[in-house]
Image (cartoon, rainbow, N blue to C red):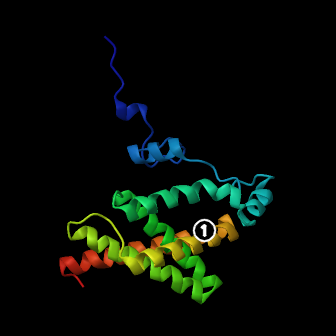
Amino acid sequence: MGRKASRKEESPSRGDSTMTTPVNRAQRRAARHQKTNPTRTGSPLAPLYLLDSARPNDPAEKAGEHLKTLARYERLRDGDGDDADFSHIGMVLAICRERAVDIDEALADIIEAGQKALIRCGDRHKRGLRYGFDGPGLMAMDYALEGCREIINASSPMQMIRARRVAVERLVGKAERGQMERMGLV
């Protein structure tokens, strides 16, 4: 009988620079789902992709997203919302607040008032009650979401992506800091 080749003999060694296949499961999964970014691959259409992401959003393009956000807000307002609705509204407000700081300080204050109202809504839920807003919170959220809609419609996709990156960095930084405080490291 012939000797079976072991798995180690079939695959190239780790130090082999000719290895193009991913090594572990995470790398294989990432390679399978990886999409090439045409602006970075040297595509002849890269300048057009860049110009497309720099143009202002058309309000009709974002109408579906605005309706979804409004539906999530209405569920929170009526007490039928869940954690996903709360997180979605919170992220929309955080992103738009980052963008509003660049546009107008008064608009940033309006959105910040909406964020404070959402925090009160979350505190209410933590006390064992359903999600919901108090009277001033309802008005603040209405104005904040209206401001968010206008910001999203007037901003380019590139501007919103940058605002999202900054908002995520702030949120993750706060979460890590809070976790370290709970563990007594800070």
The amino acid pointed to by label 1 is Arg
Instruction: Name the residue nearer the viewer: 103 or 117.
Output: 117
Residue 12, percent across and down? Answer: 45, 39
Q: Is residue 24 visible?
A: no
Which of the pair 166/4 is nearer the observer?
A: 166
Where is residue 48? Give x, y as percent.
80, 57
Residue 172, position as x, y percentages in the image? 39, 72
User: Is residue 105 left or right of 130 when viewed as pictured?
Assistant: right
6 left or right of 112?
A: left
Foreground: 158 or 13?
A: 158
Question: Do we see residue 185 in this rendering?
Answer: yes
- The one nearer the camera, 176 or 154, is 154
SS class, disc 1: helix
Q: Residues within 10 Å of mark 1 (few under 14, many from 20)?
A: many
User: Residue lying furthest front in this view?
Assistant: 135
Height in image: 168 above or below 74?
below
Of all residues shown, which one is farthest toward the bottom? Answer: 105
Q: In percent of the image, x 65 and y 53: which residue is there?
A: 37
Q: What residue would you read off at disc 1?
A: 149
Q: Say which residue appears at 36% left-offset and 31% top-offset.
A: 7
Q: What percent of the width, then of the height, locates residue 150?
A: 64, 71
Q: Is residue 150 above or below residue 24?
A: below
> What residue appears at the point 75 percent right and 60 percent down from the top-left corner?
52
> Which quadrant is home to the N terminus?
top left
Quadrant for the C terminus, please: bottom left
Quarter of the rendering containing residue 85: bottom left
User: Which residue lies at the image location 36% right of the left edge and 25% below the top edge?
Assistant: 5
In this view, 19 is above or below 48: above
